[in-house]
């Protein structure tokens, strides 16, 4: 379908049932390979081998260009023209590259073969390649595969695909426990661990784990909390293994973090007074840190282009805790079930759009003249040249923003571009 269609539904308080503008047009997003940039830092004994072209290698180099590694944990096995022309056996080449890599890097315990547009064009079956390589290298190294190709995806789906590849590897375990799903910075993970421990909630495990051997078990006793809003496939697979999702807003800002923690506290039967005792100080600290940025942000109008899938939780945080006015909240995909608690907290008049049609969205953005635009890298420069203050949405995925202690930093990320523009205009 091309063009836009307005789904019919009657609005209720909040945005839970609000009409959504559906867009199906030209897309301007990074592909799922981008997720490797934060995932390789998270799983410390994993390696990501992109089976792709020089374009894929360049994307990764420029996306990761600011970071310097002694021993990088990702690389690209380049598919050359003779592979594309069917003149070489790509499987043999891939086996040779993997054998070389694993001989040189005995620290690798988990190897992801990451598919790309070129590997899909030549129909290289990476799941078969992974089973074949497992026969040689397991149990010392586990070889898995997922696709990071970019035609119909958005960049955060790479994490969903990677975590979904891990779910079948999780051992069956009927024991009760809490699983936090979604890559979080270690500092955030440690803070969450302390809060859950103080609440008496546990055992707590994280997906992805820091090390391959720490992959948690899964079964009907497990309740899971999504830490990121872009993990639809991973959640589906966890539910298929018997785990149950705890419905909650995402842990952004003081309010979101408290509601997210409360979902687990209620499932564990933590008394309300105990919950307040444990969370009150952190929540107050977050509110104080956020309040510092309220003056420059309150009343400012913000427009979200669809990019990271974090747009709806961010709009909820910015409108409710900083008094910003979301003009349009674009998201690449709208998972109504996972976002139900967020949608209910959005201002009733917020315009939601799902999918991309860059030209139409640019027209609406220009007509609305927002104070701040959240968008992908490709749109930021042209919009800045037209006089708009912009925020790169990808930065919000790279930066620790979840939890009480990051709430002030999250607010600052939005205050900074306005401050910079105000300074430039003096
Ligand atoms: Fe490689 Fe396709 Fe991503 Fe381009 S969009 S970098 S070709 S996987």
Image (cartoon, grey):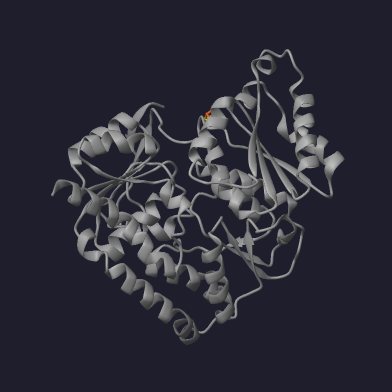
Percent position of residue 211, x then y: 69, 57
Image quadrant for the N terminus?
A: top left
Q: Give the residue displayed 81% in from the left and 41% down from the top.
A: 103
Percent position of residue 380, x then y: 32, 38
Q: Name the foreground residue: 237 vs 416.
A: 416
> Residue 161 sits in which quadrant?
top right
Q: Give the residue displayed 36% in from the left and 52% down from the top.
A: 17
Percent position of residue 60, x then y: 54, 36
Percent position of residue 295, x then y: 20, 64
Q: Give the residue displayed 44% in from the left and 83% down from the top.
A: 276
Q: Does 382 sit left or right of 57 as displayed?
A: left
> Residue 252 sits in which quadrant?
bottom left
Q: Does 419 sit left or right of 406 as displayed?
A: left
Q: Does 105 sit left or right of 334 as displayed?
A: right
Give the answer, above or below, for where 336 lies relative to 119. Answer: below
Q: Give the residue displayed 21% in from the left and 48% down from the top.
A: 421
Query: Which residue is farthest left?
Result: 426
Quarter of the rendered structure image containing ligand 1: top right
Residue 336: tell me if it is visible.
Answer: no
Give the answer, above or below, for where 130 lies relative to 123. Answer: below
Q: Name the foreground residue: 366 vs 191.
A: 191
Residue 181: tell me if it is visible.
Answer: yes
- Count of numbered marks: 0
> Residue 100 sits in which quadrant?
top right
Query: Which residue is farthest front?
Result: 70
Give the answer, above or below, for where 392 lies relative to 89. Answer: below
């Amino acid at each position: 379908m091309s063009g836009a269609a307005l789904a019919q539904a009657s609005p209720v308080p909040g945005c839970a049932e609000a009409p959504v503008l559906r867009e199906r047009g030209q897309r301007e997003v990074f592909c799922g390979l981008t997720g490797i940039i934060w995932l390789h830092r998270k799983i410390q004994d994993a390696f990501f081998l992109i089976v792709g072209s020089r374009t894929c290698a360049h994307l990764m180099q420029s996306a990761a260009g600011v970071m310097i590694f002694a021993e990088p944990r990702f690389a690209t096995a380049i598919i050359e023209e003779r592979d594309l022309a069917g003149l070489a056996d790509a499987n043999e080449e891939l086996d040779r590259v993997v054998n070389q890599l694993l001989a040189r890097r005995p620290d690798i315990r988990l190897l992801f073969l990451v598919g790309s547009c070129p590997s899909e064009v030549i129909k290289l079956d990476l799941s078969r390649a992974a089973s074949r390589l497992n026969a040689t290298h397991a149990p010392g190294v586990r070889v898995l595969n997922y696709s990071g190709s970019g035609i119909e995806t958005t960049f955060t789906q790479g994490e969903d695909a990677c975590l979904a590849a891990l779910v079948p590897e999780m051992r069956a375990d009927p024991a009760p426990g809490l699983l936090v799903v979604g890559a979080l910075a270690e500092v955030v993970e440690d803070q969450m661990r302390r809060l859950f421990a103080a609440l008496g909630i546990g055992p707590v495990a994280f997906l992805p784990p820091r090390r391959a051997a720490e992959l948690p078990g899964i079964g009907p006793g497990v309740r899971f909390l999504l830490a990121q809003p872009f993990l639809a496939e991973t959640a589906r697979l966890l539910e298929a293994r018997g785990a149950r999702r705890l419905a909650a807003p995402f842990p952004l800002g003081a309010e979101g973090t408290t509601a997210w923690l409360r979902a687990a506290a209620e499932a564990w039967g933590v008394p309300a007074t105990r919950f307040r005792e444990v969370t009150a100080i952190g929540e107050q600290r977050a509110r104080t840190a956020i309040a510092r940025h309220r003056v420059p942000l309150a009343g400012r109008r913000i427009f979200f282009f669809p990019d990271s899938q974090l747009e709806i939780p961010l709009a909820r945080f910015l409108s409710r805790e900083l008094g910003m006015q979301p003009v349009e909240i674009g998201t690449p995909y709208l998972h109504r079930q996972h976002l139900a608690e967020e949608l209910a907290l959005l201002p009733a008049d917020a315009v939601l759009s799902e999918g991309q049609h860059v030209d139409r969205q640019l027209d609406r953005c220009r007509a609305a003249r927002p104070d701040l635009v959240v968008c992908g890298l490709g749109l930021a420069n042209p919009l800045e040249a037209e006089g708009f203050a912009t925020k790169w949405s990808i930065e919000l995925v790279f930066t620790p923003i979840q939890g009480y202690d990051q709430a002030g930093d999250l607010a600052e990320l939005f205050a900074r571009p306005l401050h910079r523009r105000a300074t430039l205009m003096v």
